[in-house]
Image (tube, grey):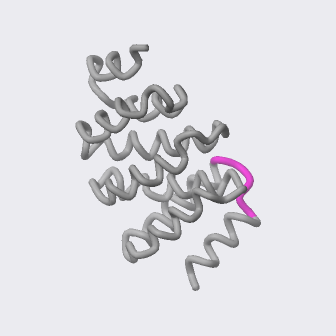
Amino acid sequence: KDFALFEKWINEYINNWASCDTFCNHTVGKFVEMYPEYISKLKEWTKSSNRWVKRASAVSLIIPARNGMFLKDIFEIADSLLLDKDDMVQKGYGWMLKAASQAHEKEVFDYVMSKKNVMPRTSLRYAIEKMPKDLKEKAMAK
């Protein structure tokens, strides 16, 4: 019931990245940490026609990602959003990957390298932002 309300609020009231990120980082993300079975709902959000719902599917996992949580799910969400043309969605899942790299640098780097030929450059740059220079150079090489 709570999660359905979150989705309704995102659909009806979120209309910019700042409100999306604040609500999702602190409210939705905390809820998912407490009730991880709702990650499946985040995966459903990746299929939404609403750009903010799609962005929310990724940015809701920023704080858990920093704490090393949900890596497999993070990669699944990134896969679902990988080819999205919306820059707000690209930046959102890139940021999620960057957060995950803080606890799982090698795994995120390997993921980025496996997708670099199709991943939008915006997402790629966000994902590798906190990585060491040598890894960034490898990821950015054409």
Residue appearing at x 57%, y 39% in the figure = 83
| x and y percentages locating residue 13 in the rendered image | 74, 63
Instruction: Decide which of 80, 96 is in the foreground and name it.
Output: 80
Taking 105 as reference, is 120 left or right? right
**In the current view of this chain or complex, which residue is farthest to the bottom?**
1
Residue appearing at x 36%, y 33% in the figure = 114
| x and y percentages locating residue 90 in the rendered image | 57, 39
* Magenta region includes residue 5: no
| x and y percentages locating residue 74 in the rendered image | 40, 53
When asked about the image quadrant of residue 44, the answer is bottom right
Taking 18 as reference, is 58 left or right? left
When asked about the image quadrant of residue 39, the answer is bottom left
Residue appearing at x 39%, y 77% in the figure = 35
> What quarter of the picture does the C terminus occupy?
top left
> What quarter of the picture does the N terminus occupy?
bottom right
When asked about the image quadrant of residue 30, the answer is bottom left
Instruction: Decide which of 117, 9 is in the foreground and name it.
Output: 117
In this rendering, the answer to whether 99 lies above or below 61 is above
Residue appearing at x 52%, y 42% in the figure = 82
In this rendering, the answer to whether 141 lies above or below 28 is above
Taking 21 as reference, is 114 left or right? left
Please provide the residue range marked out in magenta: 13-17
| x and y percentages locating residue 18 in the rendered image | 63, 49
Taking 53 as reference, is 134 left or right? left
Report the predominant secondary structure element of the magenta stretch: loop
